[in-house]
Amino acid sequence: MKIETKKQNIRIEFLIGLLVGILVLNSCSDDNVLALEPFNQISEEAAFSTPELVELSVTGLYNAAQIGIYSGTFGRGYPFGAAFIQQGDNRGEDVVNVATFYQFTYTATYDPTTANNVFYWSDTYRLINRANIVLEGVETALSNDIISQEVANDYMGQAKFLRAAAHLELMWHFAKPYNDTPDASHLGVPYRDFAITTQESIDLALTLGRNTTAECYQKIIADFDDAEALLNSKAERGGILGLIRATKEAAIAYKTRAYQHMGDWQMVIAEANKLDGIYELTIAPNDVFENGYSNSESIFSIEHTAENNPGVNAALGSQYNRRGLVVISPIVWRNPLWLADDLRREEGALVTTRDGVKYTNKYKDDVNYTDPAPVIRYAEVLLNLAEAYARENDPNNALTYLNRVRNRSLVDPATQAYENGDFATQTELVNGIIDERRFEFVMEGRRWPDIHRLQNDDFVEIDGIPAKVANGTPPADAYTLGTPYDGPFGVNPVLYNDTEFLWPIPQQEINNNPTLAQQQNLGW
């Protein structure tokens, strides 16, 4: 990463705003990733000199995850405040971008200078560096008897959780999936596990390139394992903090994702079963979003308030609701496995219709933008578990967990629930679970990670990014149920071996890191 220093007076950029009680990001130019001198000149020693400042430093990690920087100004929700949902949706075929806002992402016409993927990279590495600074600072505070071992453990667990989640997010956009090579020896991303705060650390960072994909996943799993051991539980946090702060359970849930992408189905099952009895699905699918900060299902979400959110150009309630810049695609809307009376289609609950076009209503607050960004919820863990059992050729358990998610959306589960005879083969069952993920998580950013991991799959036939409905508002009759959508498609598919399947490493990074310059994704 390019690091800017001024007169060798190195300070920690992530501490800007401590004096007013909130961590915000330093403005920086388009051509640098980290500026290490803050406006307020708080040194790293001072930042971890009292229990209160240590706590603020940790709290600041969540602000970094929520907002990010966009073109040197207030951020647009990179990486976890809104961007992971919007980019994850628009890279797939189950939404339609109706304006120009996400057009580069939607049509795969990005390049190494395109703002969305540039800031996805840089803001995610900013979060990673903050996590590493917190880890070192907490160790210092502990050695100086400023905080107790118990408090230090939880703080370090939060930093490791966010560091692992951030690297995993980068892997899905900038590296080929785990199974691209038999031993995952292909290039992943640079796994940054040390703080970049000095000229020496800057120089070191500029000599280190991309880890292999196998190394990245090993480090991701190790960080999540450590986080699970160190973190407080949901019950110990209590209340809203059990949702908007990393917990032991959130680390476990995230491991089901990581192992899923590795194809380690036995470990998906082992991790998912740890959460049995801790979370429950809400009675109705809309309850998760109607009660975003107080429901039985959400495991980890990013908090937004009226005073602190990604703003009109990024907040989910703005982009997906009030402004309606992205809509549900007829491709998924007309999937025949999605029953016509499924409650996830319910008008005014999870969906609204405008001039015949289907918009999501998952993000309710289109005025103050206070909806939490749903990072991971228990429905996903259950579907991860169902898929793992299906791939292990255990259809009974697979159907049990598939139906646990699907049945709450059915008008009459007694007659509509899946039975063994509904899927004639293991392949049909796996594909049925993948489709269920599409219905359950539409407009939650989960489609791209599935597209990414399912390349070269033994059961799911997919080659790259499927064709999409044309950029722009679809006609109302495109949503007519009864037959699968079969066109027209205005956006051509991107094949797995096409250059555009992966985002390029940003040009600013290539210009300033000679090691990464030799490791750019092919074709860029």
Image: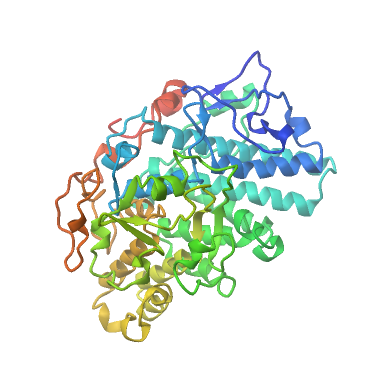
Instruction: Judge left or right: residue 264 versus residue 162.
Output: left
Q: Nearer the viewer, residue 121 or 258?
A: 121
Image quadrant of residue 44? Answer: top right
Image quadrant of residue 384? Answer: bottom left
Coloration of the structure image: rainbow
The quadrant in which the C terminus is found is: top left
Q: Is residue 445 above or below residue 31?
A: below
Tally of numbered discs: 0
Q: Nearer the viewer, residue 128 or 514?
A: 128
Res 184 seen here:
no
Instruction: Judge left or right: residue 176 versus residue 40.
Output: left
Q: Nearer the viewer, residue 459 or 65?
A: 65
Farthest right residue in view: 145
Q: Is residue 428 above or below residue 231?
A: below
Res 192 seen here:
yes
**Residue 496 image point, x, y percent:** 26, 46
**Residue 240 image point, x, y percent:** 64, 59
**Residue 510 image point, x, y percent:** 41, 25
Q: Nearer the viewer, residue 220 or 449?
A: 449
Instruction: Judge left or right: residue 230 versus residue 115.
Output: right
| Residue at point 34%, 51% (across, down) | 452
Farthest top residue in view: 7
Image quadrant of residue 472? Answer: top left
| Residue at point 63%, 28% (across, down) | 13
**Residue 242 image point, x, y percent:** 64, 60
